[in-house]
Structure formats: C-alpha cells, structure tokens
C-alpha cells in the first residue's frame, strides 16, 4: 500500500469521532421539529375545543347559562381524559385566571404563558409556544395554544357583565372563581398538549 493511500485511510479513521460528535451522541436531544409537533398537536387541541363548544352551545340554547356552566364542569374533564387516551399526550387547559384551581399555570411554564398573554393572536390565529423540558426518560415536548376570549358565547360566563345570579351559580361550583372580567381578545387560558419526547423520535 502506498504512503498516500495509508495517509487517506488514517485521515478518514481519525475523522469518525469528530463526525459522530457533530451528530449528537446516543440519548442526546436533536433539534426540535416544531412543524411536526404542531401537525400532531393542533388537531388534538382543536378537537377538544370543538367538542366542548358544541356541548356548551347546546346547553346554553336548550337550558340557559347555568346549565352550560354545570355541563362544562362535568364534560370538560371527560373530554380531556378521552383526548389524552386517544392521542397518547397529556391534554389539559391551564389559565392564570382560572375557574378550576387545579388548572393553574405550572411555575415551569410561566414564561411561555406570559408570552401568550402578551400576544394571544398571531396573524389572526391563536398564538402558540412549543418547547422541550426535562432530560432522559423525563423529557417532554409541550405545545401551548392560546385561548383568546371570544365575544359569544364565552362572554356570557367569562365576560365583564356576568349576570349576578349566574355568578352565584358559578361560585357554588367553583369557589374562588377567577375566570370572569375578560374582554374580547384577552388571553382566557391555553390548551396544553404535552408529549413524551420520544413520541417525536
């Protein structure tokens, strides 16, 4: 074998560890594919909201706002549980000014929620935050989609002029309710779709 051929083999072999380090070692997180996360998460969030809205509008139309609040308290958790089971993600709603105290904003997600509060809409659509948290088996990828306040039907139960009798009913179901006084366009809350990171490997 010529000296030049030996030299080429040595250079190629020496380059292997360097190339491997550029690609990331085993178990290391690669770049976050936000397009893939959105494609998988957005339909889950949209289906949740469509199902809930349909039931709330039906309750409002047929029985009035007090019935709608009662329906929401029972139906929303059931829809979230079904969506979680079917998708493989953890599906929930969170809000700083929440109706259900169990739906508060986790401390680790405050900065992402604050970003949505500062700008709930992006190009006329609900703004989104996507990020990765944790390491190893605890690594997760989160999709947080704004729920901007809409005039109807949301203002009936969440607006600035909630009927006193309705507010009393809300308080009977949710003592310490914080979810009124919103104006159209305000951030009322956010849909949280949280995946194990390996769902996107």
Image (cartoon, rainbow, N blue to C red):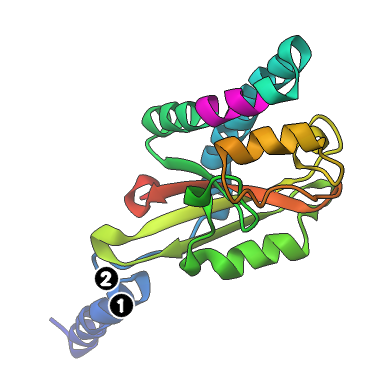
Is residue 107 found left or right of 201 in the rendered image? right
Query: Gap in Å between the C-alphas at discs 1 and 2?
Result: 6 Å
Q: Foreground residue, 92 or 124?
A: 92
Compared to residue 121, the image places residue 65 above or below, namely above
Q: Mark 1 or mark 2, which is nearer to you?
A: 2
Q: Identify which residue is drawn at 82% across, 35% down.
A: 163
Contact (Cβ within 8 Å) of mark 1 with mark 2: yes
Frontmost residue, 93 versus 87: 93
Q: Residue 99 falls in which quadrant of the image?
A: top right
Residue for badge 2: 25
Number of marks in picture: 2
**Location of residue 39 with respect to 82 vertically, above or below:** below
Query: What is the span of residues highlighted in magenta in the rendered image?
Result: 68-75
Q: Quadrant of the N terminus?
A: bottom left
Q: Residues within 10 Å of mark 1 (few under 14, many from 20)?
A: few
Instruction: Judge from the rendering whether residue 71 lies leftward or rightward of residue 31; answer left or right.
Output: right
**Residues packed near mark 2 inside 10 Å, few (<14), some (14 to 19) or many (20 plus):** few
Question: Does the magenta portion include 140?
Answer: no
User: Residue drawn at (41%, 65%), measured in percent from left and top?
Assistant: 133
Q: Residue at x 65, y 50 (%)?
A: 189
Q: Position of residue 112 (x, y in %)?
A: 60, 65
Q: What numbered label is drawn on residue 92?
A: none
Q: Main secondary structure of the magenta part?
A: helix
Where is mark 1, residue-wise? Answer: 21
Q: Position of residue 51 (x, y in %)?
A: 61, 22
Tell me where residue 66 sits by quadrant. top right
| In the foreground, 46 or 164 | 164
Using residue 122 as the reference point, say whether residue 200 is left or right of it: left
Q: Is residue 72 magenta?
A: yes
């Amino acid at each position: 074998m010529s000296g030049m051929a030996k030299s080429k083999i040595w250079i190629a072999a020496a380059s292997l560890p360097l190339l491997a380090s550029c690609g990331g070692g085993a178990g290391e997180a690669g770049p976050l594919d936000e397009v893939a996360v959105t494609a998988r998460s957005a339909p889950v969030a949209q289906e949740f909201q469509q199902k809930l809205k349909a039931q709330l509008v039906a309750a409002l139309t047929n029985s009035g706002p007090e019935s709608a609040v009662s329906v929401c308290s029972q139906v929303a958790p059931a829809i979230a549980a079904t969506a979680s089971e079917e998708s493989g993600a953890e599906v929930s709603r969170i809000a700083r000014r929440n109706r259900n105290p169990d739906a508060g904003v986790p401390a680790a997600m405050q900065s992402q929620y604050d970003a949505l509060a500062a700008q709930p809409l992006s190009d006329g659509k609900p703004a989104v935050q996507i990020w990765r948290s944790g390491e190893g088996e605890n690594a997760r990828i989160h999709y947080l989609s704004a729920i901007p306040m809409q005039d109807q039907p949301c203002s009936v139960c969440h607006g600035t002029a909630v009927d006193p009798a309705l507010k009393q009913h809300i308080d009977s179901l949710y003592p310490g309710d914080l979810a009124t006084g919103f104006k159209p366009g305000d951030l009322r809350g956010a849909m949280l779709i949280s995946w194990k990171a390996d769902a996107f490997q």
